[in-house]
Amino acid sequence: QVQLVESGGGLVQAGGSLRLSCAASGRTFSSYAMGWFRQAPGKEREFVAAISWSGGSTYYADSVKGRFTISRDNAKNTVTVYLQMNSLKPEDTAVYYCAAGDSFPEDYWGQGTQVTVSS
């Protein structure tokens, strides 16, 4: 059974930090690209960050570049992907989703975790 389970969301003041985690199991996710997306109320889901299967390549949306860092831990049975979010802004408020895919993270999705940044 494929599972992507996010955690680490919450309420934080502007300028603060949060670290999201995503535990992926049920597939050989160590060979999958992983990523994070987010969806704010009334807006479409947007790409935030992605990381290659090896962790050797990372990609970021311009809006988070320099503030967010994606990383991964390819353990044997469960792959964990992290999103370290620093210098958070109210416009970062959204539901954050973890995703995985063969070449781009779009095939498997988690349920999401809420991040709220207060001004």
Image (cartoon, rainbow, N blue to C red):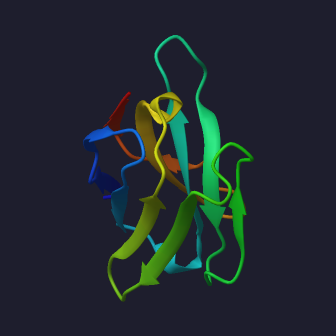
The residue shown at (58%, 78%) is 31
How far from the left and from the top, in percent, is residue 109? Answer: 46, 46
| 68 with respect to 52 (left or right) | left
Q: Is residue 103 left or right of residue 41?
A: right
Taking the image as drawn, is residue 2 in sight?
no
Residue 57 seen in render:
yes
Q: Is residue 62 above or below residue 40?
A: below
Q: Quadrant of residue 111?
A: top left
Closer to the camera in the image, 102 or 59: 59
User: How many discs mark residues in the rendered view?
Assistant: 0
Q: Position of residue 119 (x, y in %)?
A: 38, 27
From this view, report whether residue 92 is shown above or below residue 44: below
Q: Is residue 67 above or below residue 109?
A: below
In this picture, residue 61 sits left or right of residue 29? right
Residue 68, percent across and down? 55, 58
Q: Nearer the viewer, residue 36 or 68?
A: 68
Task: Identify the residue at image location x=57%, y=57%.
Answer: 67
Q: Residue furthest bottom?
A: 76
| Quadrant of image for the N terminus | bottom left
Query: Which residue is more in the foreground, 107 or 94?
Result: 94
Q: Position of residue 108 (x, y in %)?
A: 50, 50
Residue at 68% across / 42% down in the picture? 63
Q: Nearer the viewer, residue 32 or 41?
A: 41
Query: Which residue occupies the extreme top position in the image?
Result: 42
- Residue pictured at 34% horizontal, 61% vertical: 21
Q: Is residue 14 above or below residue 85?
A: above
To which quarter of the image does residue 114 belong? Answer: top left
Residue 103 in the figure: left or right of residue 45: right
